[in-house]
Amino acid sequence: MSRFRRIAVNTRGRDLAVGDIHGHFQRLQQCLDGVGFNPAIDRLFSVGDLVDRGPHSAQALDWLSQPWFHAVQGNHESLAINYLRGGRLDLDMYRAAGGGWFLDLPEDQQRPFVDAFLEMPIALEVQSHDGPIGLLHADSPFANWEDLRASLLDDDDPRIREVCQWSRRRLKEGDDARVEGLRALLVGHTPVLKVKVLGNVWHLDTGGWSSGCFSLLDLATLEVVSPTPDEPAHQRQGPSASPPRPAPARAGLGQSGAVPDDCQ
């Protein structure tokens, strides 16, 4: 696995980003259809946590196999890896956090998921015409993106990985310091009522897997292009006709956005 991955600018279509998915791929698909996502030219970037909690976690393998879908490794993917690889893990916490679907699989059926999760980078850097955009699951442990890139490429420090995948500090403290070297840093992990920006850090987990909605961010404009649930249909952006579906069919938030569940 390459812990850090850089992706070139999209010269043909749009680049969109989304928050935590947590097994709600069909709900996400409806959101993509609503903005006219075209898998032939568009790309979708995920801040991780593809699995657990929702009913269609097994579809993660289908989505990860699509050339237009790119995701960083979230803490829930890390939990599955630790379970199969013998890492530190609280099984009761993992099951309570929605991991029962994975824990109850035979080992030979768990392995394809862990193999795919191991290929997911900790950090992504996506080039845009106005500068690089970074993606992590939770937060950056460094104030400069170049320092994080060097750390991930040179060493697999578990303390660095823990901040990248588990930290809620920035939101809890309202830290609006920028992460230098980036146009924007996109993260998830902690649900918020609506997309929240602190400095140049965009928090995208608006609870599409729960009682909220998925928020799709256009990387070119840094604008949310997906409609909110109460937005009138005539105000929704994108064509009314649904494009070809990009993924195969087979397969009460607080004001601060913080959730008192450390296994989120």
Image (cartoon, rainbow, N blue to C red):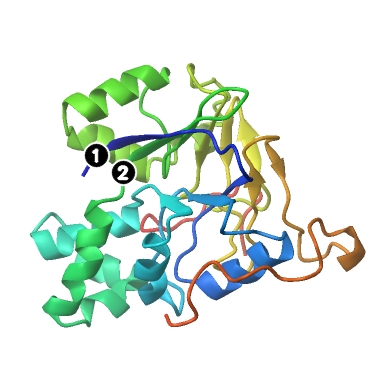
Q: Which residue is mark 1?
A: 2
Asked whether, in this view, residue 139 is left or right of residue 203, the answer is left
Which image quarter is the N terminus in?
top left
Q: Residues within 10 Å of mark 1 (few under 14, many from 20)?
A: few
Q: Give the number of marks.
A: 2
On screen, residue 131 above or below 3: above
Residue 168: image quadrant is: top left
Q: Position of residue 72 (x, y in %)?
A: 38, 47
- Which residue type carries mark 2? Pro
Q: Residue at x 45, y 66 (%)?
A: 22
Q: CA distance from mark 2 to mark 1?
A: 6 Å
Which image quarter is the C terminus in?
bottom left
> Tag on residue 121?
2
Q: Position of residue 158 (x, y in %)?
A: 19, 37
Residue 52 visible from this viewpoint: no
Are circles 2 and 1 on residues that touch, CB within 8 Å? yes
Q: Nearer the viewer, residue 109 or 206?
A: 109
Q: Residue at x 36, y 62 (%)?
A: 65
Q: Residue at x 30, y 58 (%)?
A: 77
Asked whether, in this view, residue 131 is left or right of residue 150, the answer is right
- Disc 1, SS: loop
Asked whether, in this view, residue 145 is left or right of residue 94, the answer is right
